[in-house]
Image: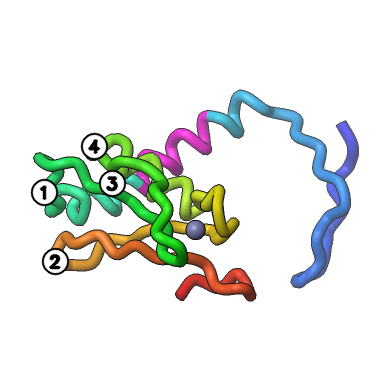
Amino acid sequence: MGRNIPIGAGEFPKKIEIVDIDGLKQSYEKLKKELIKSKEKQIKLIDIKNNIEWRCANCSRFLDRLVNQEQIEGYLVDFMIEKFKICHKCRKRNYFKINKNGEILFLMLAENNKKI
Ligand SMILES: [Zn+2]
């Protein structure tokens, strides 16, 4: 095992050695569950008896059909780790969020990668 090299704030290590991959995976799963729990209340508000069509916020190309809570939870976790849905037509990165009324707002990343 290499020794730990302290790095200052704002610096990023060039290389990271992961010594406990299983532990890391477990932590990730735990984190994911926590993240989902924090969203569950909002997700429950969504009426998903009818499929929800997700279309690109820029060009309206069909992206996916939202059919159940599990799938929506999966997407919300993806967005938190910056995994967005890229439109095959215009290449915009799409995501969605749920407002406190339980409505899904379909959005896309701006050119500067900021959420709008
Ligand atoms: Zn598009």
Task: Provide the secondary structure element on which disc 4 rests.
Answer: loop
Amino acid type for the residue under numbered disc 3: Lys
Amino acid type for the residue under numbered disc 2: Asn
Amino acid type for the residue under numbered disc 4: Val
- Look at the image and say whether residue 62 sits in the magenta stretch: no
Between discs 1 and 4, the one toward the N terminus: 1
Q: Nearer the viewer, mark 1 or mark 2?
A: 1
Task: Provide the secondary structure element on which disc 3 rests.
Answer: helix
Q: Quadrant of residue 25?
A: top right
Q: Quadrant of residue 65?
A: top left
Pointer 1: what residue? 47
Mark 3–mark 4 distance (CA, rounded to whole Å): 19 Å
Q: Residue at x 83, y 58 (%)?
A: 6
User: Which of the image's four quarters has the C terminus?
Assistant: bottom left
Amino acid type for the residue under numbered disc 1: Asp
- Crowding around mark 1 (Cα neighbors within 10 Å: few <14, some 14 to 19, many 20+) is few
Between discs 2 and 4, the one toward the N terminus: 4
Q: Does residue 81 appear anywhere in the picture?
A: no
Pointer 2: what residue? 101
Pointer 3: what residue? 37
Pointer 4: what residue? 67
- Crowding around mark 2 (Cα neighbors within 10 Å: few <14, some 14 to 19, many 20+) is few
Mark 3–mark 2 distance (CA, rounded to whole Å): 18 Å
Q: Residue at x 14, y 43 (%)?
A: 48
Mark 2–mark 4 distance (CA, rounded to whole Å): 19 Å
Extent of the magenta region: 26-35
Between discs 3 and 4, the one toward the N terminus: 3
Between discs 1 and 3, the one toward the N terminus: 3
Of the pair 116 and 58, the residue shown nearer to us: 58
Between discs 3 and 2, the one toward the N terminus: 3
Image spot of residue 39 (x, y percent): 28, 52
